[in-house]
Image (tube, helix red, strand yellow):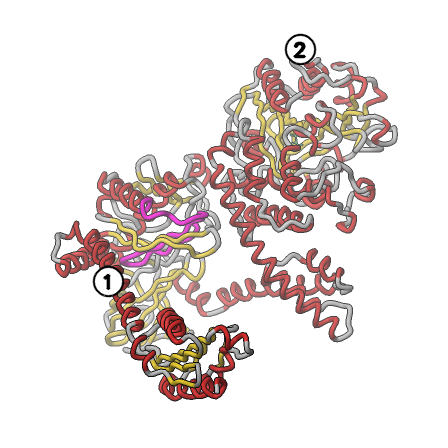
Amino acid sequence: MQTSQIRSSFLEFFQSQDHRLLPSASLIPQDPTLLLTVAGMVPFKPYFLGEADPPAKRIATVQKVARTVDIDNVGRTTRHLTFFEMLGNFSFGDYFKREAIRWAWQLSTTPADEGGWGFDPDRLWATVYTDDDEAEQLWLDETDIPASRIQRRDANDNYWSTGGSGPCGPCSEIFYDRGPEHGPDGGPIVDESRFLEFWNLVFMQFETAGNGDPKLKGSDDIVGTLPAQNVDTGSGLERVAMLLQDVPTVFDTDVFRPMIDRAVDLSGVAYTGTFSAAHVADEDPDPADDTTDTWLRVIGEHARSTAFLISDGVLPSNEGRGYILRRLIRRAVLSARKLGTDQRIMTPMMESVIETLGDAWGDLKTQGNLITKVAQAEEDAFSRTLSTGLVMLDEAVQATTAGGGTALDPEAAFTLHDTYGFPVDLTVEIAREKGVTLDRDAFAEHMEAQRQRARAATKSDRQAASTDVYKEAFQAAGTTTFTGYSRERDESSVAALIHDGAIAERVQEGQNVQVVLPRTPFYAEGGGQLGDHGTIATPTGRIQVTDTTAPADGLIVHHGTVVAGEVASGTDAELVVDHARRASIRRGHTATHILHATLKEMVGDHAAQAGSAIDAGHFRFDFPHFESISRDQLGELEGLVNDRIADNPEVVTREMDQQAAREAGATALFGEKYGDTVRVVTIEDYSMELCGGTHVGSTGEVGLFTVLSEGSIANNVRRIEAVTGPEAFGHLAKERLIAEQVAQILKVPTAEAPARVEELLGRVRDIEKQLARARQDAVLAQADVLAESARVIGDAKVVAGVVDGADHDALRALALDLRNRIGRGAVILGTAKADGKAQMLAALSADLVEAGTNAADVLRPGATVVGGGAGGKGDVAQAGGKDGGKIAEAVRVAADEAAARLA
Ligand code: SER
């Protein structure tokens, strides 16, 4: 049965049981506690927990799933995968164990021509959780399975949760007996390779805190009972396909084999379909037992997960899901290198995945370009890492063996790993080939020390913040109330002053100061927006504020200098924000939101904000993207953003609770922390962001937006720098002035200037060519004079001379011409070049060469004079030297040498 038929029979079956069919959710879960969608139920967690109402009480899906806990097993076992499709039916407080069991059995055993999967019922086994008598009884009541093929298993096997916090429950699994050739009798509790699990029915009833190893989850970890009894089932499509297609492994199914075949084509290494016996027997496989088959399978498998992750918006990086993706790509590339190929594999592998799965998963096709480009760029970057690493490793290995040692310096291995991203497994492998070993424990110590250092660094930063003067200032002032959303002036009182890092009662004119007050209209740097500037006036003095920060939650600090009088703690203060600067920042901040939304619409959802800095006058905006934005695209982007500015909708800011904001679809910016109540900034229906910054009232106030530059700041990360409002006008006005000046000089209207410049440049190129030709002619014209001045030695002649303004070609042409004219003899020419260096050339007649005289030998004494050496073979030789001033003498010396040899 083709995989497409397995998918459709599953969905049709559950649709006929009144299930609503929903499309797969993204591999990037909404749920912040999970890195990836690790099960079909992930998108439905809020429904199980009673936090939201499901759109239907019965749902069925084919969900994209990524799991990397078993990544090291991939390729080494017949069944482990990092990406698979999960068929699942779900009940939210509707049916429970009875129907879940009945329907799973029914679909599994109904013959294929009647819409089922056609498994032989005599080969099916079931397991239930230790004390789940009810489930066992239901298997007996609802199906034909005999009690002898129902087994009980503990929480290690028959209790399910995502591994994080959330719903959980006991489960019941269905297994297929692949026959005695695959292992011993005795059912799933004896052998999970012969008895292959293909459907897991989870009876979701409890809530877990998720504090331990997901596989060891048991009733101990349960912190509550769910509002209803639910069902979550999951059946791995690739496994069902393997069984129904009667192929030995998931890698032989129709959704897999094409990728393995492509890897075979690329590497030229045949696939035998065998598994290392040591791996099959071992749950903790040793890389030493890997075979070429293992690597082919890794390439094929990781290609699938790579394509799906990128199509859902994951990009390679050093953390989180980006790191998972990077690891997958690197493992695939390393496997290819181990197979002995240096070919780039990612583009063809991605194409293979798109061809094979693009009909079922349309996103693969629409995002095809992104997928191949990102994967290929990552492979290329990694290949460079590998080359650098290999050279360094080679040096380290040589240093070891040169000293007679056999143990690699663990620090070298650590540096390779830590600084260059060079995989330690590879280090071990390559070193081993040279008879050098790595002490893995010592290496692990370096890793641990590094972790400690990282931890200590974050801790000491935090400690500093909490122990230093800010703590005292905070105690004096309490939480600072920020009033700057609605005003730029406010009154308050000086709660604490800091001078030179210590609390001060008074600070004098000319001294630096930090001020803390109970309330302030000054915005503290955050969310990409820089801190406000302005003045703080007290009855006795005035402070010029040049920065505002929030060193701790709830504490706003104004940094500046006392510019008049002195200021004292406890006095009244009038705070005035620099209006022009704030206005400019406001324009910039609203513009970044418009830019963010517009950019995503233009190049794709992956172009999410990765950082920004909004200063007065200009801002920068960073985003992940795999190629540059073309000049045309930039022009289009500017146009669209300016249209949205001119449309002038209101910029609406609202406070709401975090959950409501997420549900409304607000962009939660990764890595930023938000309290329970969040501020949401909305512009029409195209932009909704969680944002604490200050904005204009309606977009028209931004006035004008123009891009200053676009470029790359890191692998796959681009930066746009832009200006808004009067600054944008100023920028464009300056450019216009330049254009006008150019047009004036050219004496054409501005619009014609580019064509005119093109034309002029063309003429300059022509003139340069003519000039070069004229120079050469002038050089050649000296032939007559030189030929007449030849020294005659018997039947031979020596022509020698210094030719001004000759380049190498001209000099050579002249020398050959002269040689023709003299018949027998030697020609020696030289020139002093524009850069002050000397150039010489010697050409001998053929008979001299035959008689054993070499042109380079003739030239050499002369070359020595200008500080150079002679080279060339046979009848023509050339020489260069640094001392152009001595060229005349050099030519004479060489000519004398020629004469001496002729005499
Ligand atoms: N959540 C369970 C699993 O992933 C059943 O869908 O196995």
Q: Is residue 634 visible?
A: yes
Q: Amino acid at mark 2?
A: Glu
Q: Is residue 659 magenta?
A: no
Q: Amino acid at mark 1?
A: Ile
Relative horizontal placement of residue 483, taking residue 112 as reference (left or right): left
To which quarter of the image does residue 444 belong? bottom right
| Pointer 1 residue | 767
Residue at image position (23%, 48%) is 704
Residue at image position (25%, 63%) is 770
| Pointer 2 residue | 114
Part of the protein shown in magenta:
610-634
At which x and y percent is residue 138? 75, 18
**Extreme residue toward the right, this view:** 185
Q: Is residue 497 visible?
A: no
Sequence order check, earlier mark of 2 and 1: 2
Relative horizontal placement of residue 695, taking residue 670 as reference (left or right): left
Residue at image position (55%, 32%) is 355
| Secondary structure found at label 1 | helix
